[in-house]
Image (tube, rainbow, N blue to C red):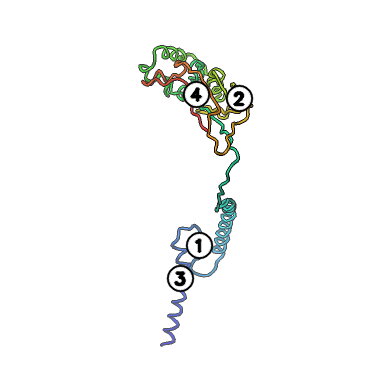
């Protein structure tokens, strides 16, 4: 009787699932529950094992590239203080915040970019016409007349180059380190929502030695553009116009 009881207990113990089998049947990891199943090894179980190991291998191969890329950068950086013998005068960038000239806008420009310029709404109609200057409104109404109009090809790059402000028309005086400069000493480095011009003149950059007081080495005078060139001035009560510019190194 004792031998029979011990045999029954041993067979019941062998039927108890292992920890890995319990984990495989409770996890949401796809496919692993078909690998660690109860019972003997079958062909279906082998196929699932091959598919799971193959997928895991592909994941590791794909991830290894990203892991190697992450560890390719230094994680410990030492910074040493070095006294420079001379300081190079920083480049000055002028960003025009009023990027479009109202007088250069055409009917085709308004058809394609009128909503972008906040001059027309989604229905190609003038929003809030009562807020506009009467002279500006009359010109806009004439240009925004799309009756029997056939739109032409529109290029944003050509539009920005044609409608944007020309530094040659705005520059009155330019001087850098005692030498006069002109619009040719500037180059356009960004044509986007705000056009940016970078000074790249033929004159040498200003240099200030250690202990020497910093002095302004450049002087640039820009012409105040007419308010009519900025249609926003007709729509806003503060009358924003002119040629606002941001200067920085």
Local secondary structure at mark 4:
loop
Disc 4 and disc 3: Cα gap in Å?
73 Å
Q: Would residue 198 be found to the left or right of residue 19 on screen?
A: right
The answer to which image quadrant residue 140 occupies is top left
Local secondary structure at mark 2:
helix
Of the numbered discs 3 and 1, the one sitting upstream in the chain is 3
Residue occupying the point 41% across, 87% down: 2
Task: Judge the density around disc 2: few (<14), some (14-19), many (≥20) Cα neighbours within 10 Å.
Answer: some
Relative image position of residue 23 (x, y in whole percent)? 45, 65
Q: Say which residue label 1 marks.
A: 34
Residue occupying the point 54% across, 38% down: 211
Task: Judge the density around disc 1: few (<14), some (14-19), many (≥20) Cα neighbours within 10 Å.
Answer: some
> Mark 4 and 3 residues: CB-CB less than 8 Å, in contact?
no
Of the numbered discs 4 and 1, the one sitting upstream in the chain is 1
Q: Say which residue label 2 marks.
A: 185
Compared with 230, 28 (above or below) is below
Of the numbered discs 3 and 2, the one sitting upstream in the chain is 3
> Mark 4 and 1 residues: CB-CB less than 8 Å, in contact?
no
Q: Say which residue label 4 marks.
A: 99
Q: Give whichever of 233, 205 is nearer the camera.
A: 205
- Which tag is nearer the camera, tag 2 or tag 1? 2
Quarter of the image with the N terminus is: bottom left
């Amino acid at each position: 009787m004792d031998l029979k009881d011990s045999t029954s207990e041993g067979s019941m113990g062998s039927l108890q699932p292992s920890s890995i089998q319990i984990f495989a049947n409770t996890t949401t990891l796809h496919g692993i529950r078909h690998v660690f199943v109860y019972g003997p090894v079958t062909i279906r179980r082998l196929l699932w094992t091959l598919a799971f190991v193959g997928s895991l291998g592909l994941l590791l191969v794909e991830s290894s590239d990203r892991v190697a890329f992450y560890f390719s950068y230094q994680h410990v950086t030492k910074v040493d203080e070095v006294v420079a013998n001379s300081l190079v005068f920083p480049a000055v960038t002028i960003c025009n915040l009023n990027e479009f000239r109202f007088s250069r806008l055409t009917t085709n420009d308004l058809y394609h970019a009128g909503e972008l310029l906040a001059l027309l709404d989604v229905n190609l109609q003038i929003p809030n016409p009562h807020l506009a200057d009467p002279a500006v409104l009359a010109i806009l109404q004439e240009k925004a007349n799309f009756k029997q109009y056939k739109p032409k090809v529109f290029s944003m790059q050509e539009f920005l180059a044609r409608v944007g402000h020309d530094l040659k028309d705005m520059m009155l005086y330019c001087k850098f380190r005692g030498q006069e400069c002109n619009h040719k000493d500037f180059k356009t480095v960004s044509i986007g929502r705000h056009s940016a011009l970078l000074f790249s003149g033929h004159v040498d950059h200003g240099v200030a030695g250690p202990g020497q007081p910093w002095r302004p080495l450049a002087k640039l005078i820009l012409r105040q553009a007419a308010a009519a060139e900025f249609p926003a001035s007709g729509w806003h009560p503060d009358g924003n116009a002119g040629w606002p510019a941001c200067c920085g190194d």
